[in-house]
Image (cartoon, grey):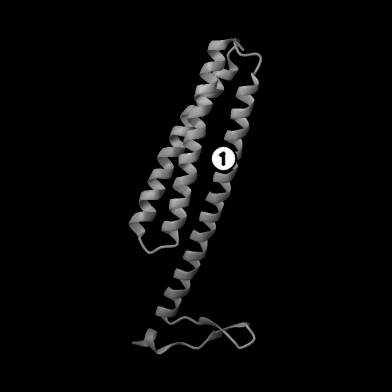
Amino acid sequence: MNPDSRSRLEDLLDREIELARVLAATLADEKTALTGDSPAAVEKNAADKIRVLETIEKLDVERRALCASPASPGIAATVVERWRNLMELMAGCRTANEINGHIINVRQHQIRQLIDIVRGGPSITYDPHGKTFAKALRAIARA
């Protein structure tokens, strides 16, 4: 790999690493918003996450084009180290995003249960041994 191509690739990887750090922070903020009570914060974090991911995707396309060029047959150790750092950061982001998705699923389930209670459907309660059972219609739903 010629020095100019290597320098461009290192710069691209550095920018991707920085964006991966921004994405990790955004995902942490999203997790906080998901466990809070502000829908506006959830929407803002989702929009921020999409913007960061779009920028990462553009840099990925640029990096792939640079690596596919005939002038880049060998990869320097500095590039390999940056690549490893980027992959570790992105793996952490993937895990954080999966956790956030789980939080969303749990919240949706809770909301469905609350709606069922308000509509008069059976509510799920627990007996003294921790087993669940459906309780009869509540008066709130009949009102």
Q: As rendered, which of 81 and 68 lies closer to the eye?
A: 81
Q: Position of residue 104 (x, y in %)?
A: 49, 59
Residue at screen point 48% across, 74% down = 113
Q: Quadrant of residue 54?
A: top left
Q: Judge from the rendering whether residue 131 lies leftward or rightward of residue 139; answer left or right.
A: right
Q: As rendered, which of 55 and 25 lies closer to the eye?
A: 25
Q: Position of residue 72 (x, y in %)?
A: 61, 13
Q: Judge from the rendering whether residue 108 lies leftward or rightward of residue 95; answer left or right.
A: left
Q: Is residue 101 above or below residue 72?
A: below
Q: As rendered, which of 130 and 115 lies closer to the eye?
A: 130
Residue at screen point 58% across, 14% down = 69
Residue at screen point 65% across, 22% down = 77
Q: As rendered, which of 69 and 123 lies closer to the eye?
A: 69
Residue at screen point 50% across, 67% down = 109
- Could you tell me which quadrant the C terminus lies in? bottom left
Q: Position of residue 12 (x, y in %)?
A: 50, 24
- Could you tell me which quadrant the N terminus lies in? top right
Q: Amino acid at mark 1?
A: Met
Q: Which SS class for mark 1?
A: helix
Residue ID for mark 1: 90
Q: Is residue 60 above or below residue 69?
A: below
Q: Is residue 52 above or below residue 72?
A: below
Q: Judge from the rendering whether residue 132 lies leftward or rightward of residue 36; answer left or right.
A: right
